[in-house]
Image (cartoon, rainbow, N blue to C red):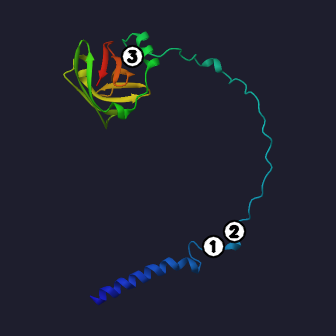
Amino acid sequence: MRVSHAAAGLAVVLALTGCQRTSFGGFGSQDVSRAPAPLQAQPVPSVSAGQLPPPAGASQFPAAPTTGTAAPGAAAGTEVAAATNALDVTKESMVGNWRVSSAGSSCDMFLTLPNLGSGSRGGTRGCAGELTAMGSWEVAGKQVVLKDRSGNPIARLYKTADARFDGSTNGGQPVSLSR
């Protein structure tokens, strides 16, 4: 028993001795005689202000769009109005159970935070049409995108009230979520 204590004590002493090696000119020691000379300050040219010329070849780029784009099959005016008047939305505020109204019927939608591909897990129960394939969702700016199990968008929704989202499926069917 005493031999094992002595061996352990000797190992600790050897380890501590190895830490003191830098004082003998080993790795980490500093030799002041080889230190580089400090750099001298250099003059800085004056800064000028002015308008930059337009980029060369600027005409090669198309003009920026003036209106938002609608989901395929959706009415463009409705989609643009919803996007313009949409309230801010966070991913955390979407989590939970939602009541869905679409195509004259209602069903349930469940949204969770765990990831599934490019979005978070979600699903529907009792829904008809395109929403039966819903498998994930994500928040993109002020828009909530519902996706199928392959990650393809199937519906886009915008927050229109505190606990309400309105939008449409890719097929043009109106969709509303509420709590």
Instruction: Tell me if 167 is positioned left or right of 23 in this view.
Output: left
Foreground of the two, 47 or 152: 47
Q: Indicate the quadrant where residue 64 lies.
A: top right
Q: Position of residue 91 (x, y in %)?
A: 37, 33
Alpha-carbon span between mark 1 and mark 3: 67 Å
Judge whether 15 appears above or below 66 on screen.
below
Residue at screen point 38% across, 14% down: 72
- Secondary structure state at the residue bearing disc 1: loop
- Secondary structure state at the residue bearing disc 2: loop
Name the residue that disc number 2 marks. 35
Q: Of all residues shown, which one is farthest toward the front? A: 162
Circle 3 packing at 10 Å, graded few (<14), some (14-19), many (20+), is some
Mark nearest the camera among 1 and 3 is 3
Are dots 2 and 1 in contact, CB under 8 Å? yes
Name the quadrant of the N terminus: bottom left
- Looking at the rendered structure, the kind of residue marked 3 is Ala
Foreground of the two, 129 or 139: 139
Are dots 2 and 3 in contact, CB under 8 Å? no
- Looking at the rendered structure, the kind of residue marked 1 is Gln
